[in-house]
Image (tube, helix red, strand yellow):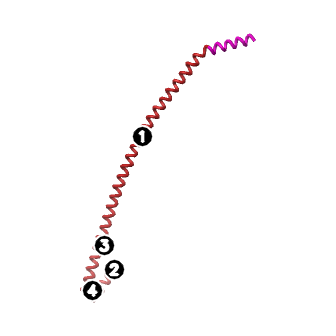
Amino acid sequence: MNCSDELIRQVTIQCPLRGFLLSRVRGELNQTLEAYRLTLDASLAEEGKVRIDQSDAEVMMLTKKLNEAEAELKIAEEEHSNLVSDYREVLGRYDLFERIKTQLHEPAVTFAKSVGQAIEVCV
């Protein structure tokens, strides 16, 4: 504002009343600009608060989704655990079935082997 200061000084030399009025106009202009700056700052601050509030809402929504996903994961893990235990139980039953089958047929197999050996001896 050095230019305006010099202009006001020169006008004040020629006409003190005009210089005084120009000085007041400059003061009013500075006050108006400062008011606009404050309004702009307040507006930007309010917009920032609104964005923060929106972000908080988004964070809450994402937290809710995360909790739901964790609950689904827990259910899936329980189902997996149940399926694994069922698989092991079925596998154990199958092994038991195979052992019983082997034990049931072992005498017949032993007899067939002995008959086969006897036939080989005879031949």
Q: Tell me which numbered mark, 4 or 2, is placed earlier along the sequence.
A: 2
Rendered image quadrant of residue 72 = top left
Q: Amino acid at mark 4?
A: Thr
Query: Residue 73 at x, y = what percent?
Result: 43, 40
Kindly identify which numbered label has been placed on residue 12: 4
Residue at 42% across / 38% down in the picture? 74
Comparing labels 1 and 3, the label whose residue is closer to the camera = 1
Q: Tell me which numbered mark, 4 or 1, is placed earlier along the sequence.
A: 4
Magenta extent:
108-123
Q: Which residue in the protein does label 1 denote? A: 72
Query: Residue 48 at x, y = what percent?
Result: 34, 60
Q: Which residue in the protein does label 3 denote? A: 33
Residue at 27% across / 82% down in the picture? 22
Q: Amino acid at mark 3?
A: Leu
Residue at 54% across / 24% down in the picture? 94
| Magenta span: chief secondary structure | helix
Q: Which residue in the protein does label 2 denote? A: 2
Tell me how far mark 1 sits from mark 3, CA to CA: 58 Å
Rendered image quadrant of residue 121 = top right
Tell me how far mark 4 sits from mark 2, CA to CA: 15 Å
| SS for dot 3 | helix
Instruction: Tell whether label 3 touches label 2 (CB within 8 Å).
Output: no
Is 15 or 100 nearer to us in this picture?
Answer: 100
Tell me how far mark 4 sits from mark 1, CA to CA: 81 Å
Left-right relation of 65 to 28: right
Q: Amino acid at mark 2?
A: Asn
Q: Amino acid at mark 1?
A: Glu
